[in-house]
């Protein structure tokens, strides 16, 4: 790729003869797109409102007004309604495709489930994507488009219409060094850098439905030969809403730890006291012996300490954790709030919002609610956390800032997104914007970590519960060096085997800045 690639990214037109389609906004956007120099365009789904033949016929007429060297058309969930996925293939083209030209690979995928708002890629699409990415592994630019979001989007209400196997797709994108991903669906523009993959969501060009009173919009993306990704979010009249600049480095992850370990954290979840079988007790003791052997500064429990939230469960847990009480920070999970668990939780544990230990600040964010696996933070708690994080980061730049919660924010490979945090989009945006260093979770029983912007997100498996998505129980060990590098490992409880989950260089604090000056 010897020159920059310029892309118009637009989405969610929702063609219909009814009032849901705003014709004036569409015409305005088309006028700007036609005047904007670009190499190709990506439309990321919802061409029609209800997948009806009359809407596809209207689309046939009106989309001819767009003058572009090439447009990649991606099917959306509204296009799949009423059997519309069959009409799409007749009127628009294939629902899955690939094209490779001039060192640029583009893959288009169908993430839709007919007559459902939520999405799914499925095993065949995931395998297809991997095969194409391996075949064109030398492509200088790898791009993928699909309709459904895989990271939660802010300002979109309850998180309930994402792709259920988003974690599996995220794993494919990161494993095969995809440069940029184009999505739509939620009618709100958003850009995230996940490790070295840029995930770009477009707003709606012409739907009656907008978010928080925002403008209808589209994106203009430029990717330079040096892999700088410039995203301009534009109103349909061409005015700029926001400019985003992300850099893809693709550096080998060497980390500097010559100054030694500043902080060592043991992360656990799912101890499930109260089950009453010997195997759980044996696994717990073996796991804690392994943790002790690593000599951590702190033990962070990310939920489901008990199995049913009963008095006997809490009494067993308190007794078992008593030897580690000076190092323990606990955040509850859904199991801990069952029955009268919410009352018992405050009887046996002092759940503070903020804890300062070892020159570090830990924010305990209770995402669990009684009698449901679905999590929630709430607007009041978000505002309090945002205010406090901004204040403490301004006052305490030398400290390491960690949020401890139960529910995950980033989709986890090998699991299904059926009990996510319902306001995950707003919480994810809050953490990345405030520059929190580390976010810990313990949901779904599988270890995984990645980095979004400058925040590392680490989920752990269960320590001794039988409810695990992994083959065996484990815990995570997180080492932060004085230079700011982070190494995340998973340690298997039965075998003691250790594997590296992730290496993240360059966590910026005044402490590691001083060590390099």
Image (cartoon, rainbow, N blue to C red):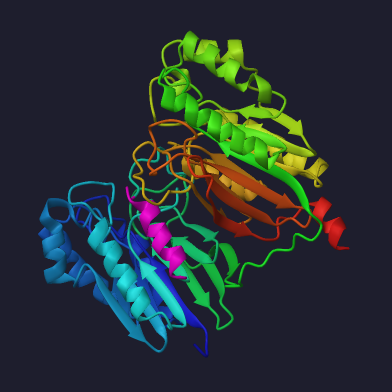
Residue 90 versus residue 456 in the image, above or below: below
| Residue 149 seen from this side | no
* Quarter holding residue 371: top left
Counting from the top left corner in percent of width and height, residue 457 is at: 56, 48
Q: Is residue 252 magenta?
A: no
Q: Is residue 219 left or right of residue 265?
A: left
Foreground residue among 332 and 219: 332
The residue depicted at 36 percent of the width and 50 percent of the height is: 414
Counting from the top left corner in percent of width and height, residue 272 is at: 46, 24
Foreground residue among 21 and 174: 174
* Quarter holding residue 386: top right
Q: Is residue 169 left or right of residue 254?
A: left
| Highlighted magenta segment, given as a residue range | 163-177
| Residue 400 seen from this side | yes
* Quarter holding residue 329: top right
Q: What is the number of callouts on the image?
A: 0
The residue depicted at 38 percent of the width and 31 percent of the height is: 466
Counting from the top left corner in percent of width and height, residue 475 is at: 54, 40
Foreground residue among 234 and 42: 42
Where is the C terminus found, in terms of image quarters? bottom right
Residue 46 versus residue 373 in the image, above or below: below
Question: What secondary structure is the stretch in magenta mostly built from?
Answer: helix
Q: Is residue 512 left or right of residue 178?
A: right
Q: Is residue 171 magenta?
A: yes
Counting from the top left corner in percent of width and height, residue 313 is at: 48, 14
Q: Is residue 128 left or right of residue 2?
A: left
């Amino acid at each position: 790729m010897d020159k920059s690639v310029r892309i118009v990214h637009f989405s969610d037109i929702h063609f219909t003869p009814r009032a849901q389609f705003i014709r004036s906004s569409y015409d305005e956007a088309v006028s700007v797109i036609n005047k904007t120099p670009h190499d190709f365009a990506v439309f990321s789904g919802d061409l029609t409102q209800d997948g009806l033949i009359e809407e596809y016929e209207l689309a046939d007429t009106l989309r001819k007004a767009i003058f572009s060297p090439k447009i990649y058309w991606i099917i959306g969930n509204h296009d799949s309604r009423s059997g519309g996925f069959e009409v799409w293939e007749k009127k628009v083209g294939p629902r899955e495709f690939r094209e490779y030209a001039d060192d640029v690979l583009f893959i288009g995928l169908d993430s839709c489930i007919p007559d459902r708002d939520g999405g799914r890629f499925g095993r065949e699409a995931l395998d297809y994507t991997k095969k194409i990415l391996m075949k064109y592994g030398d492509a200088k630019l790898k791009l993928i488009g699909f309709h459904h979001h895989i990271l939660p989007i802010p300002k979109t209400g309850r998180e309930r219409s994402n792709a259920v196997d988003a974690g599996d797709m995220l794993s494919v994108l990161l494993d095969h060094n995809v440069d940029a991903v184009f999505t739509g669906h939620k009618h709100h523009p958003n850009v995230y850098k996940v490790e070295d993959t840029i995930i770009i969501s477009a707003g709606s060009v012409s739907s009656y439905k907008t978010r928080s009173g925002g403008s209808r919009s589209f994106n203009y993306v430029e990717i330079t030969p040096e892999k700088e990704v410039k995203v301009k979010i534009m109103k349909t009249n061409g005015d700029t809403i926001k400019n985003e600049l992300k850099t893809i480095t693709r550096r080998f992850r060497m980390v500097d730890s010559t100054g030694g370990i500043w902080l060592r954290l043991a992360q656990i979840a799912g101890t499930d006291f109260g089950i009453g079988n010997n195997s759980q007790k044996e696994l717990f003791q073996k796991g804690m012996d392994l943790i002790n052997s690593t000599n951590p500064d702190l033990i962070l429990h990310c939920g489901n300490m008990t199995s049913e939230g009963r008095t006997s469960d809490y009494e067993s847990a308190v007794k078992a954790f008593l030897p580690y009480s000076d190092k323990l920070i606990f955040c509850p999970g859904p199991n801990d709030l069952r029955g009268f668990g919410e009352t018992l939780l405050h009887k046996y544990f002092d759940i503070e919002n903020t804890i300062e230990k070892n020159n570090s600040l830990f924010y305990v964010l209770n995402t669990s609610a009684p009698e449901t696996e679905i999590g929630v933070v709430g607007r009041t708690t978000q505002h309090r956390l945002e205010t406090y994080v901004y204040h403490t980061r301004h006052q305490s730049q030398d400290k390491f800032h960690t949020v401890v919660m139960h529910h995950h924010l980033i989709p986890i490979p090998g699991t299904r997104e059926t009990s996510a945090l319902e306001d995950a989009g707003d919480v994810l945006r809050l953490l990345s914007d405030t520059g929190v260093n580390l976010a810990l979770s313990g949901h779904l029983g599988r270890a995984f970590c990645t980095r979004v912007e400058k925040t590392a997100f680490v989920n752990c498996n269960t320590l001794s519960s039988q409810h695990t998505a992994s083959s065996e129980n484990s815990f995570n060990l997180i080492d932060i060096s004085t230079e700011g590098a982070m190494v995340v490992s998973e340690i298997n409880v039965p075998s003691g085997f250790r594997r590296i989950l992730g290496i993240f260089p360059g966590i910026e604090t005044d402490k590691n800045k001083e060590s390099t000056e």
